[in-house]
């Protein structure tokens, strides 16, 4: 019996997870987006469910698939939709992990008809999206809140400042300087920083293995 408990340390816990990119509409056929595949987030969903957690996976447009009785998937397209769904469920969860590559900007005006081409330059004005993670940090009660940081320079300093600014319990730093880390790859190299600013760096591994490391660290942190 002890054995079962130690293998399912998140049994009875609810996890909210965001994953994938968001698409911000320009007109009915075009959008502003990014290269996130959703691989990392979907791997975390599976790793969390394998530890016994009930997972709500809020996914932007992604070709990833997941089949697990403990994972419920809600598909969204834009940052605004992801924000709404995340806030609808945040109060009911124990752990929130925001791995999505949310667009920072969206077209200020969405054309209702397809924009026709012209010979002149086209300017699209962008306005900021809402920061889902920062918003959840502001209203945090007992949830364990984890964010991600994608950095190309000054990585540790930037990640720590995100952790503090957004009121997180931990942040996963993804450095794009590391070969084999990032969007399109099957591997990733991370550093996890906790709220006391302790850093723990991991080797380059498959995203499936990285996801297990992340979930194990969360289990350790919530039981500490
Ligand atoms: N995030 C979010 N909502 C946004 C933007 C980001 O929830 N509108 C979350 C991401 O899911 C990630 C964290 O915030 O967990 C950090 O994202 P990142 O792009 O690294 O940082 P930003 O705060 O957006 O700052 P910048 O892009 O300028 O580095
Ligand atoms: Ca960003």
Image: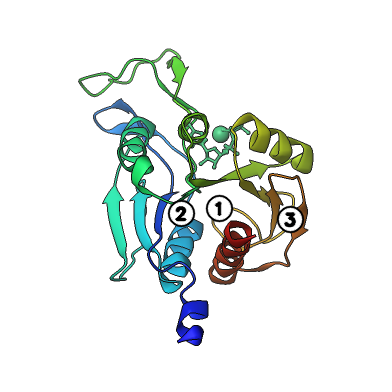
Q: Quadrant of ligand 1?
A: top right
Q: Which of 173/222 is in front? A: 222
User: Which residue is located at x 72 percent, y 64 percent?
Assistant: 202
User: Which residue is located at x 62 percent, y 62 percent?
Assistant: 217
Q: Which of 22/51 is in front? A: 51
Mark 2 secondary-structure assignment: loop
Mark 1 secondary-structure assignment: loop
Disc nearer the start of the sequence (1/3): 3
Find residue 31 and name its label.
Answer: none
- Return the x and y of residue 111 as percentages of the image width and height: 26, 18
With 119 as the anchor, is 145 left or right in this view?
right
With 81 as the anchor, is 191 left or right in this view?
right
> What residue is pinned by disc 2?
37
Mark 2 Cα shell of 10 Å, populated few (<14), some (14-19), many (≥20): many
Mark 3 secondary-structure assignment: loop
Q: How many marks?
A: 3
Determine contact: label 1, label 3, CB under 8 Å. no
User: Which residue is located at x 36 percent, y 49 percent?
Assistant: 59
With 119 as the anchor, is 180 left or right in this view?
right
Vertical arrangement, residue 18 with respect to residue 4, above or below: above
Disc nearer the start of the sequence (2/3): 2
- Return the x and y of residue 113 as percentages of the image width and height: 20, 21
Q: Which of 43/196 is in front? A: 196
Q: Is mark 3 within 8 Å of ligand 1?
A: no
The quarter of the picture where the C terminus appears is bottom right
Disc nearer the start of the sequence (2/1): 2
The quarter of the picture where the N terminus appears is bottom left
> What residue is pinned by disc 1?
183
Vertical arrangement, residue 61 with respect to residue 135, above or below: below
> What residue is pinned by disc 3?
178
Kindly tell me whether residue 14 is visible in this rendering: yes
């Amino acid at each position: 019996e002890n054995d079962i408990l130690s293998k399912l340390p998140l049994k009875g816990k609810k996890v909210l997870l965001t994953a994938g990119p968001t698409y911000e509409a320009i007109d009915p056929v075009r959008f502003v987006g990014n290269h996130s595949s959703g691989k990392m987030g979907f791997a975390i969903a599976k790793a969390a469910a394998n530890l016994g957690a009930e997972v709500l996976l809020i996914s932007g447009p992604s070709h990833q698939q997941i089949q697990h009785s403990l994972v419920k998937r809600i598909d969204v397209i834009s940052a605004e939709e992801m924000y709404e769904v995340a806030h609808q469920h945040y109060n009911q969860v124990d752990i929130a992990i925001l791995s999505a590559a949310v667009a920072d900007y969206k077209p200020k005006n969405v054309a209702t008809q397809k924009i026709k081409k012209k010979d002149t330059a086209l300017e699209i004005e962008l306005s900021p999206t809402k920061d889902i993670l920062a918003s959840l940090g502001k209203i945090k009660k007992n949830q364990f809140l984890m964010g991600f940081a994608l950095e190309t320079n000054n990585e540790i300093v930037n990640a720590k400042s995100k952790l503090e600014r957004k009121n997180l319990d931990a942040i996963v730093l993804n450095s794009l300087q590391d070969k084999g880390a990032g969007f399109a790859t099957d591997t990733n190299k991370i550093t996890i920083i906790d709220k006391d600013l302790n850093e723990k760096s991991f080797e380059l591994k498959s995203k499936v293995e990285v996801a297990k490391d992340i979930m194990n660290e969360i289990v350790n942190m919530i039981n500490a």
